[in-house]
Image (cartoon, rainbow, N blue to C red):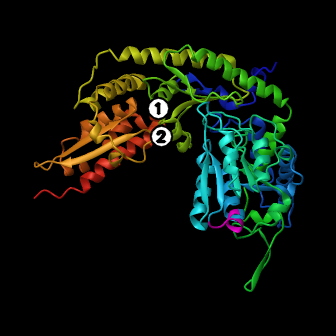
Amino acid sequence: MFDPQSVRRDFPILDSRVNGQPLVYFDNAATTQKPEAVIRAVADYYRQSNANVHRAAHALSSLATAAFEQARESVAAFIGAASPREIVWTRGATEAINLVAQSWGRACLGPDDLILVSTLEHHANIVPWQMLAADCGARIEPIPLCDDGTLDLEAYRILLQQQPKLVALTQASNALGTLNPVVQMTRDAQAAGARVLIDGAQSTPHLRIDVQALGCDFFVFSGHKLFAPTGIGVLWGRESLLASMPPWQGGGEMIERVSFSGTRYAGLPFRFEAGTPNIAGAIGLAAAIRYLEQFDRSELEAHELSLFRRALELCREIPGFRLIGEAAERVSLMSFQVEGLHQQDLGLLLDQRGIAVRAGHHCAMPLMERLGLPGTLRASFAFYNSLEEVEFFAHSLAQIVAEQHAAEAGPVSMQPPDVLEQLERCRGWQERYRQIMLLGKQLPALPDALRNDDNRLHGCETRVWFRAETGPDNRVRLHLDADSRVIRGLIALVLAAYDGKTAEQILDFDLEASFERLGLMRHLGPSRGNGLRAIVDAVREAARRQPPLT
């Protein structure tokens, strides 16, 4: 049986502390941590062989080129490519999909051609096809989803009767963990005359990939989800198919000869790699592959799935817990909600205990719309995670849920308009956060008539409603609400500072300085911090629109 303790020392960040607590990192579907071997490989490149590749006539460039092209060979072997010429470096899976859309898609798709994408897709495997369809007149249809989070294969086969030109399909859902039967779906699509692109961003970290066995035409993945650096990714395509595709971007490296009378492009894979590549990223990806290949990947997968099963077993005992997505075939990812509690609030409360999870729509908004959810909380596991971490997570979540339900009946100790001053007197962030949550509980809800799409405030990951009106006394009346308690608490701070003030008073008051003194932006995290900035910006913009006092 695989023992995660044997590898944890290879990942320096796992010894970190967050908010005074030992780090428990369960956000591996967003990005994985990096082993020392990868960190050292990248550092060694910059220390010992930093140079541009392929064309310079000096020793450093020769070293860099050899390492860079050896990395390409490592990736080709890792995924079962027929040749390194089939491996194209990109910045990530997103850019790889865009490359296919803009090169193959523009050359091969036209008006009324059909593109099928699944309802499970990440935005990166939806938006590039939408952009292409808008330009060339193609149309897009989603492959429907069953209630258990698996694709409706009967509906898929019916859609294939329309003879689509492309099927774009994730192998593993980043939001639900569902593993799609991509081998059979690929065969069915190709029998109907379609090309198939598989997004392997979520599957490659967990499964051994063999593109020959998958049978697809294109396969993409990102390095940063595979224990490698950010900014490096891979497009694999069949050599005959890549050779027929025009370049996507122009510049250096992707040419054989340039003159003002015309340009002759380079062969594979260089015609798709314009400009200086991410040399260090490719070397780091090769180091990550070498690190992984010392293990039995099936043992790693079994360990990760055991973590998921134990987490689910413990969390099902928490009142209101609901797993989102019940697919039997899956990767080690648990997407869930707790009744009556917003996922953003739970994510921040877990973060206070050092537990890193993801909250939101996970860049899968069409999927969330199909499920009727604003988002979920997602705990995603890697082989360096331990059973003890899972049990600590489940115990912490149970405590948080119990505390939040108990707080529903508790008194509110703070009253506007002095909340900013009161918060500054709190002892530490934990106490401030508790008070912000209490303010969120106290904030009166907006009438349903104002909680509509016309009043939705964009730029916030949670749903926020905003409306500003000016009374006969030239004072701005603010109507604000949100579906997250922590954001409602922050709204209470904004209202305490701005509501009922004149436009001049609003524009003169530096609320951001108060937030800085409170440490809000450091502790809230990027998504909630951006949401708070969006609220403040909306209030100030409303004030700017008011006519000056006469």
Asked whether residue 113 appears in the rendered view, the answer is yes
| Image height of 18 relative to 539, above or below | above
Q: Which range of residues does the magenta coloring cover?
A: 105-111
* Depth check, front residue: 221 or 474: 221
Contact (Cβ within 8 Å) of mark 2 with mark 1 = yes
Q: Is residue 67 left or right of residue 262?
A: right
Q: Is residue 509 above or below residue 36?
A: below
Give the position of the N terminus as an image quadrant: top right
Q: Position of residue 483 (x, y in %)?
A: 38, 33
Q: CA distance from mark 2 to mark 1?
A: 9 Å
The one of 310 and 10 positioned closer to us in this rendering: 310
Residue 399, label in figure: none
Query: For this view, does 108 lie left or right of residue 448?
Result: right
Mark 1 Cα shell of 10 Å, populated few (<14), some (14-19), many (≥20): many
Q: Give the crowd class for mark 2: few <14, some 14-19, many >=20 residues within 10 Å.
A: some
Instruction: Name the secondary structure under disc 1.
Output: helix
Residue 164 figure quarter: bottom right
Res. 247 image quadrant? bottom right
Q: Is residue 236 magenta?
A: no
Residue that mark 2 sits on: 527
Which residue does the image show at 14% across and 48% down from the upper left? 471
Q: Residue at x 28, y 41 (%)?
A: 450
Going from the N terminus, do you reach mark 2 or mark 1 first?
A: 1
In this rendering, the label closer to the viewer, 2 or 1: 1
Q: What residue sits right under mark 1 in the picture?
A: 344
